Image: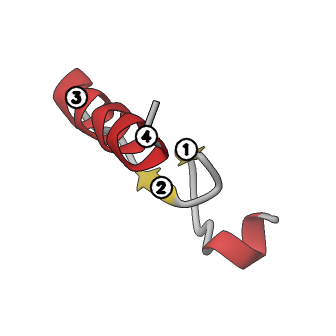
Amino acid sequence: MAQQVGVRGVPFFVFDDTYTISGAHGADTFLNVLKTVELKSGK
């Protein structure tokens, strides 16, 4: 799975099998991705 989503280093996070965050990021980045996942999932 890691090769399929393009993992090249750590940390690497995958959300909803679609959205990824690579490298160190602040809480705002994670919050934005989580909000996007929620909106796109329709829940």
Helix or strand or loop: what does disc 2 sit on?
strand
Q: Disc number at residue 26?
A: 3
Reading the image, the residue beneath label 1 is: 13
The residues bearing labels 2 and 3 have C-alpha atoms spaced at a distance of: 14 Å
Judge the density around disc 2: few (<14), some (14-19), many (≥20) Cα neighbours within 10 Å.
some
Q: Quadrant of the N terminus?
A: bottom right
Name which residue type carries label 4: Gly
The residues bearing labels 4 and 1 have C-alpha atoms spaced at a distance of: 21 Å
Q: Mark 2 or mark 3: name the one nearer the start of the chain.
A: 2
Q: Mark 2 or mark 1: name the one nearer the start of the chain.
A: 1
Q: Mark 3 or mark 4: name the one nearer the start of the chain.
A: 3
Reading the image, the residue beneath label 4 is: 42
What residue appears at the point 64 percent right and 71 percent down from the top-left corner? 5
Nearer to the camera, 24 or 5: 5
Determine whether 37 is above or below 19 in the image: above
Reading the image, the residue beneath label 2 is: 20
Q: Mark 4 or mark 2: name the one nearer the start of the chain.
A: 2
The answer to whether 25 appears left or right of 15 in the picture is left
Query: Residue 17's x, y, as percent?
Result: 65, 55
Q: Mark 4 or mark 1: name the one nearer the start of the chain.
A: 1
Judge the density around disc 3: few (<14), some (14-19), many (≥20) Cα neighbours within 10 Å.
few
The residues bearing labels 3 and 1 have C-alpha atoms spaced at a distance of: 13 Å
Q: Residue furthest front?
A: 42
Name which residue type carries label 2: Thr
Judge the density around disc 1: few (<14), some (14-19), many (≥20) Cα neighbours within 10 Å.
few
Nearer to the camera, 3 or 39: 39
